[in-house]
Image (spheres, coloured by chain):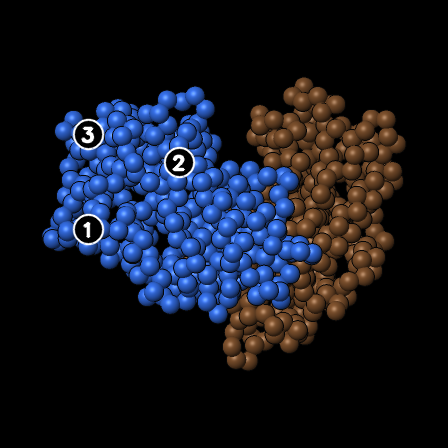
Chain colours: A blue, B brown
Amino acid sequence: MESAMNGGDGVYSYAKNSAYQRGVIDVAKNVINETIAENLDIGAFNSSKTIRIADLGCSVGPNTFTAVENIIEAVKSEYQSQIPEFHVFFNDHVSNDFNLLFTTIPQDKQYLAAGIPGSFYGRIFPEASLHFVHSSASLHWLSRVPKEVKDKNSPAWNKGQIIYAYSGDEVIRAYKAQHEKDMDNFLQARALEVAYGGLMVLTFPFNPNGSHPSERLVNLSFGLIGTCLMDLVKKGVVSEEKVDSFNLPLYFMSPQEIEAAVERNGCFSIVKMEILPPVRGHNNGNESLDHQLAGMMRAGTEGLIKQHFGEDILDELFDLYRKKMTETFIPSMAKSVEQGHLFVALKRKS
Amino acid sequence: MESAMNGGDGVYSYAKNSAYQRGVIDVAKNVINETIAENLDIGAFNSSKTIRIADLGCSVGPNTFTAVENIIEAVKSEYQSQIPEFHVFFNDHVSNDFNLLFTTIPQDKQYLAAGIPGSFYGRIFPEASLHFVHSSASLHWLSRVPKEVKDKNSPAWNKGQIIYAYSGDEVIRAYKAQHEKDMDNFLQARALEVAYGGLMVLTFPFNPNGSHPSERLVNLSFGLIGTCLMDLVKKGVVSEEKVDSFNLPLYFMSPQEIEAAVERNGCFSIVKMEILPPVRGHNNGNESLDHQLAGMMRAGTEGLIKQHFGEDILDELFDLYRKKMTETFIPSMAKSVEQGHLFVALKRKS
């Protein structure tokens, strides 16, 4: 079950429902510039006439193109004389809409472009080939749902819920174990692929150290889909069993958890970690907030929901979701002081 | 106007109508193996732990996967001990169906895969990055139709024809000039991209030295589309003007012409050139020959025809084409001694 964002350029496409993710890229721009200025060691790359940049979990444009252009500008400013060639690798699941991605690459791009299909939890690049890795709003998607939470006979069965935030400790532990395995695979693969001295910048929605996931609004936004699915059970539209066996492969790690993963791996040092300012005022033109939030959620989860429940429930589900957002989420959002994504910059040790 | 093959996996898809092109790959296998055994200088690549292979004009699978696997096996057998990693770059026009290509990459592949969108007549790879370039049945597609042949006021106006083979010298000269420009761009781009000692193997339908293109069956197979379009003019289905302004961007070069292009460029030496055995007995299961030939032609030219004439004429046109193939082409084919594709192997001079 792959968690690729919606393809195409229709009403519920990721391309048209990613203003928030664009906001994350904008608020991360300065800190990425700083990271590059303080840590990029172009001397280490001198033997390479090409600088290779990967965007992991790129989905479709235009956000990935903006992110990549920002990085290239920052890297270029580190070079005094001869600017190298840039080879940019756009990575996402095999089921990502690469056709749309490729046809929308800007004409005036200052790099050579490649698409890399496959999960970033495995090896997707040759050894020591990458100089800069970027991943924005992707690393909270696990490689899979931990199987215990779908198992009726397991103490970690996640009955009536589709995320772990509002479940018992057994469920949370199962998700945490999956996350640790995924992060270990992620860092192990990147340790092989990133050249010595190479940088990796990651931004993702997170859980603060020591806080319970149920306190985070980001969990509420996903959890409400579960509430809506249970409403559809009551209406007889879907079976309760079907909902009990559905979970989203999502985990929001804490700063401590990424520090621990980096330490377990041993090949990277954390050169910067900070909480980004919250994203505000990013929207799709004149659309009202409830439609925007529902559209964003649909672009990101429709694929998984469709695979499990079929296509027919989608309109009803997300209409219900939009209403619930208006009742529950939007008022909480207004009062919230919840901060933005976590930004972490890692450098490949030599 | 891009000449990408039909995407998807429908009745007229390239994926289902490329048994002939598969045949070309099969007959080229031995000569590619020989070329690698005789000319691959792995010592020159010692500084690279990764061998980078590009398939230019890959379209969709499975032919491109077969070609690449053959090459990797041949390259691997040159290594005594430590086998390098292989990074394979699948290249085709931006409008190629990369989504289908990526979802059909074999699970057990022994390489890392990338998609490279863009015309191979321009720069698409970093400098000195490629060790082996393969291109099968692609290089006869020009980057564009020479504009004189669409110009009513030019002596090279190609009235009533859609290829140059049956036209006057002015038209042939215009196509030849376009081909020379394209080959110069192709070789200039590859000279920058292929590492010293790197190999490039090209197979393409060709015109023998000194023979007139009208003598070649491959021209008849494309020319008959023009005949069918003129029949649709008589039936009032399309306007004569529309046919007069339509041309296929195709050129079949001769051994002398590729030799001349390689000499003009100066960065490659021809290490092997031979005519491949003709492709025989390749077909799509039990389909009759006329349906096969019409399906293959439709998969390769439908995109261009649709752009110019619209979708509505396609079924009628290719039904007519199938009938004409039965009357004219298939009988000639049976008697023909026409040989297969030309195979040319080039080595990047250091």
Q: Tell us which disc is closer to us: 3 or 2.
A: 2
Badge number at residue A81: none
Q: Amino acid at mark 1?
A: Ile
The residue wearing badge 2 is: A279
Q: Amino acid at mark 3?
A: Leu
Q: Residue at x 32, y 66 (%)?
A: A264
Badge number at residue A232: 3
* Left or right, residue A158 beside residue B149: left
Q: Where residue B212 appears, x then y in whole percent?
A: 83, 48
Q: Where residue B86 appears, x then y in whole percent?
A: 53, 65
Q: Which comes before the other along the chain, label 1 or label 2?
A: 1
Mark 1 vs mark 2: tell me if same chain.
yes
Residue B149 to residue A191: above or below:
above
Name the chain letter of the residue that bears numbered label 3: A
Q: Which comes before the other along the chain, label 3 or label 2?
A: 3
Q: CA distance from mark 1 to mark 2?
A: 27 Å
Q: CA distance from mark 1 to mark 3?
A: 25 Å
Q: Residue at x 81, y 61 (%)?
A: B266
Query: How crowded is the residue under tag 1: few (<14 C-alpha within 10 Å), some, or many (20+)?
Result: many
B264 and B338: which one is in front? B264
Query: How crowded is the residue under tag 2: few (<14 C-alpha within 10 Å), some, or many (20+)?
Result: some
Q: Tell us which disc is closer to us: 1 or 3.
A: 1
Name the chain letter of the residue that bears numbered label 1: A
Q: Residue A40: which quarter of the image?
A: bottom right
Q: Where residue B334 appears, x then y in whole percent?
A: 67, 50
**Residue at disc 2, secondary structure:** loop
The residue wearing badge 1 is: A172
Q: Is residue B285 visible?
A: no
